[in-house]
Image (cartoon, rainbow, N blue to C red):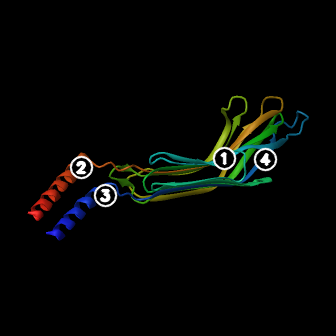
Amino acid sequence: MHSKLIATSAAILGLFAGQSAQADASASATVNNIKFYVFDMDLNDGEAATATFEAITGQSANSWTHVNGQSAGGDWDTLPSLASLSYLGASAQASVVGGGALDSFVLQAQAISGNGNAYSNAGISLNFTLSKNAMLVLSADTSASATTTLGKTAAGRETAYGIGQVGFYSGINGSDIGSYGYVQSYINDDLAGHVETNGQTLAVFHNTSGASYNLWGDVYADAQARIPLAVPEPETYAMLLGGLGVLGLLQRRRRV
């Protein structure tokens, strides 16, 4: 009877645990070799087109896991900026390293989930002075990947998303201006899969103000991996309670 009790217990607990068993999803993004180019859009205005790279105005790395809510952040304006977090089956890492020259910067973000949501972000902000009638092009080499191992779980779809992006925004109101470029990999399907994308991203801004312009650049890498938290169905709870009741009855009969 004792062996039957153990077998029954294992079967019931295995059924309950099976409802929360999940596969892994992962995503990553890398941005490096950041460069800029300037073009003269009016050769008759008597002024040479110039773009002056003023400074890195900020950089940060951040990681989050959303199983029950945890976060970690790198030091803003401090290089290297690093963040790493692992919590209850979800992990995220982000980093900004480099310095000296703009093209020495490397931004990386990675997220892995076996349960819940993992998210990471690495970014830098750039400051330029652009002469009138000049066009500024910001470029970077970018890669992104996304992987799911199961596709659809009992609780919902796995999701993996990686993106690297360059763009410009106004220092006056913080709104996006000009064009932006990005490379992304995204999976949100019933089937498992892997997507990887590599390429050069470009952002373009044309100063038509007739005067020099203070311009802000934005470069970042994001990664997100999500596996829905398994919540046992009411029927599972009923089966569990019923099974425990059977175990109690068997144990009572064994004592008799």
Residue denoted by label 3: 17
- Front residue of 73 and 106: 73
Q: Write the residue at 13% across / 61% down.
A: 250
Residue denoted by label 1: 60
Q: Is residue 67 left or right of residue 75?
A: left
Q: Is residue 2 left or right of residue 32?
A: left
Looking at the rendered structure, the kind of residue marked 4 is: Tyr
Q: Does the rendering let one see residue 48? A: yes
Residue 228: % across, % down: 40, 49
- Marks 3 and 2, Cα distance to the nearest angstrom? 11 Å
- Front residue of 244 and 160: 244
**The quadrant where residue 53 appears:** top right
Residue 226: % across, % down: 45, 50
Mark closer to the chain start, 2 or 4 = 4
Residue denoted by label 2: 237
Position of residue 147 relative to residue 121, above or below, is: below
Neighbour tally class for label 4: few under 14, some 14-19, many 20 plus, Cα within 10 Å: few
Q: Are marks 3 and 2 in contact (CB under 8 Å)?
A: no
Q: Residue furthest front?
A: 256
- Marks 2 and 1, Cα distance to the nearest angstrom? 44 Å
Circle 4 — which element?
strand
Mark closer to the chain start, 3 or 1 = 3
Residue denoted by label 4: 37
